[in-house]
Amino acid sequence: MTLAKRIIPCLDVAGGRVVKGVNFVNLVDAGDPVELAKRYGEEGADELTFLDISASVEERKTTIEIVRQTAEQVFIPLTVGGGIRSTDDVNNLLRNGADKVSINTAAIARPELINEIADRFGNQVLVLSVDARRGRTPSGFEVTTHGGRQGTEIDALAWVEAAITRGVGEILLNSMDADGTRAGYDIEMIAAVRAISSVPIIASGGAGAMNDFALALNAGADALLAASVFHFGVHKIGEVKRYLAAEGYPVRQ
Amino acid sequence: MIAILDYGSGNLRSAERAFALTGQEVIVTSDPELCLSADGLVVPGVGAYSACMEQLRSIAGEEIIAARLSMKRKIFGICVGMQIFFDGGTEKNGSSGLGIWPGEVSPIAAPILPHIGWNTVTAATDSILFNGVADQSFYFVHSFAAKSQVPQAINTFCEYGEPFLAAVEAEYVVATQFHPEKSGDAGAQLIKNWVNTL
């Protein structure tokens, strides 16, 4: 028995559609979220992540209806992020079919939100989404907000450690430098966070070549999140899993 | 009819939909009459052990479960809904459970927790639940587990850092530590296997 490394397609949602850009700008339409979720479920996705990427910028509430419709048809775990500011927001999402929630900007603004969510729902529902880039903080990795458009001068490793102490159950580590480039995950950043994290790490940002997935697992990722390579048909989920299995990594097939 | 016990814990919509795939009528309810008359009662559960027990008590869930047991009517516990069937849990300051099964629920000895994701199990050879899906993976998300065999029951173990109970099948009460309602086709088959025993 070995816990499988998870492959997680990420559906960035804005205005009820899946969108994808490079470094969070130049967004293009990538399809209907519910249809895409169903297809990924059939293709062997281990989880699905919805991120309402317009939430922090346009103060838009997360698209509950998309989650509700997906949860009715797809029987794998759903994580939802974007615009979550309170335990009531979390409760609303869980009641509508989300299994986990991810928080980002609101936790930076008010870290106590992590404790409040973990105390009420348990740390297993709470994913801390960290949008980090190379920067001049002590570890060399800086937390950003607003889809990577604003620096915070917060050190990414210090933030992850503090958030784990407060009660997050997983880290979604998104490289703002690599996001959408398909030039590979930020391997050094994954390894640096792995060294200080006692919770699972979901690597995100930069997946392109098959070998990128293996390199991220090798650096210590427990799960691999990708968007554009799946949305635009560069790789099928099944192909990635067969590749990883052949390389000796445990995957669910 | 299958009743899913609504005591404010768990992703009830997914459980409702997954059990409805069997063709059975499914009701999400905390009404004692419906819970007692249902052919099967599902007890979901997420979050902290003590919080689940508190919420269960607030709807007189202990009495509902005890009454079903005395009537020899079937119950299916999921995740923390399984854990509360044991004597107690050590999470936070500790909490007593329903004591249907002996033993306590304690942290898993593994370097990275929670245990999140798809894992395989060693299905007991006489298992009914795992009929046809014994070699499949199931979705787990938890940091605590029961670790010792339940007597006079079919015990199925998983391993993550150490062996722990993935499923228990007693005469009237069955339970899984994983989430069958989130385990895709394999989970749907396991649910069907249980519904066929009702």
Image (cartoon, rainbow, N blue to C red):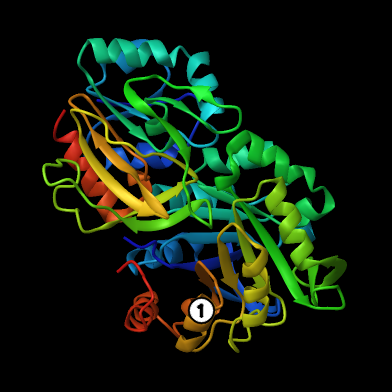
**In the rendered image, the vertical position of residue B1 relative to residue A33, given as above or below:** above
Task: Tell me the residue at 14%/32% (across/down).
Answer: B197
Task: Tell me the residue at 77%/67% (across/down).
Answer: A156
Q: Left or right of B133: which side holds B65?
A: right
Task: Please state, as top left, top right, bottom left or bottom right, where the C terminus of chain B lies in the image.
Answer: top left
Q: Quadrant of residue A248?
A: bottom left
Tell how many labels: 1
Q: Left or right of A228: which side holds A22?
A: right
Q: Position of residue B65 (x, y in %)?
A: 34, 16
Q: Left or right of B132: which side holds A17?
A: right
Q: What's under tag 1, amino acid-wise? A: Asn
Task: Tell me the residue at 17%/25% (across/down).
Answer: B171
Residue toward you, A205 or A68: A205
Q: Position of residue B179 (x, y in %)?
A: 37, 45
Does the rendering let one see residue A153?
A: yes
Task: Please state, as top left, top right, bottom left or bottom right, where the N terminus of chain B lies in the image.
Answer: top left
Residue toward you, B178 or B187: B178
Question: Which residue is labeled 1 in the image?
Answer: A218
- Chain name for mark 1: A
Q: Position of residue A15 (x, y in %)?
A: 64, 61
Does the rendering let one see residue B34?
A: no
**In the rendered image, the vertical position of residue A132 relative to residue A38, given as above or below:** below
**In the rendered image, the vertical position of residue A61 relative to residue A180, given as above or below:** above
Q: Which SS class for mark 1? A: helix
